[in-house]
Image: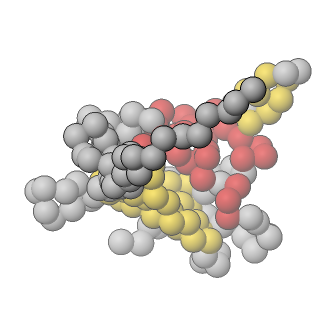
Amino acid sequence: MMAESGDSALSFPHRSAKVANLHFVLPFPPSVNRYYRHVGYRTLLSREGREYRKRVCSLLARRVGQPLQGHLEVQLDLFPPDRRRRDFDNFQKGIWDSLQHAGVYADDSQIKRAVIEMHAPDGEGRAEISIQPREPCNSVPTNNQPSTRSTRTSGKKKPTRSS
């Protein structure tokens, strides 16, 4: 579904009752360079960052139920408002933090996979976000899973140092 303006926030649950996918259309975010400001040794959310987060929260008000739990997978499509050169990796932090503050998920550390694409401008700037649950990776054995590494030694004694 195409958004008509950057002030829309749409969510569509996935057709499957088992998996809930969310889709949001948000305003184009400020760059991470303008999202934060530094005062002495402290890093604070800038005025522009607070305004963006407040705008996202108001757009998502009453559209978000309980925060998503578990690992998440995110697709972020950025449509900038103009043709200025931008680094695509300067925009996700403001979006992740704003979605967390709006109650979409408990913590942005839940995002285990993110695909980010910067598209050519096509009118008004926006960020389209799709979020779905992600199966956890089983690369690290847990207490319930046996390790694939052998901890047995060859049965030979280690040589001792003589003095």
Query: Residue 104: image x %, image y %?
Result: 37, 41
* For residue 117, side relative to residue 47 (left or right): left
Q: Quadrant of residue 43?
A: top right
Query: Residue 76: image x %, image y %?
Result: 50, 63
Q: How many marks?
A: 0
| Residue 85 appears in the figure | yes
* For residue 99, side relative to residue 66 (left or right): right
Residue 27 higher or lower than 97, as above or below: below
Look at 79% across and 22% down and name the residue there: 42
Residue in the foreground of this view, choosing between 104 and 126: 104
Q: Quadrant of residue 79?
A: bottom right
Look at 67% across and 38% down and name the residue there: 49
* Figure quadrant of the C terminus: top right
Residue 109 higher or lower than 25, as above or below: above
| Residue 10 appears in the figure | no
> Which residue is most to the left?
17
Q: Quadrant of residue 88?
A: bottom right
Query: Residue 153: image x %, image y %?
Result: 41, 47
Residue in the foreground of this view, choosing between 108 and 118: 108
> Which residue is most to the front?
163
Residue in the foreground of this view, choosing between 84 and 143: 143
Query: Residue 133: image x %, image y %?
Result: 30, 54
Look at 57% across and 71% down and name the residue there: 117
* Figure quadrant of the N terminus: bottom left
Q: How is the image coloured?
A: secondary structure
Residue 148 higher or lower than 50, as above or below: below
> Which residue is most to the right?
40
Look at 37% across and 51% down and name the residue there: 150
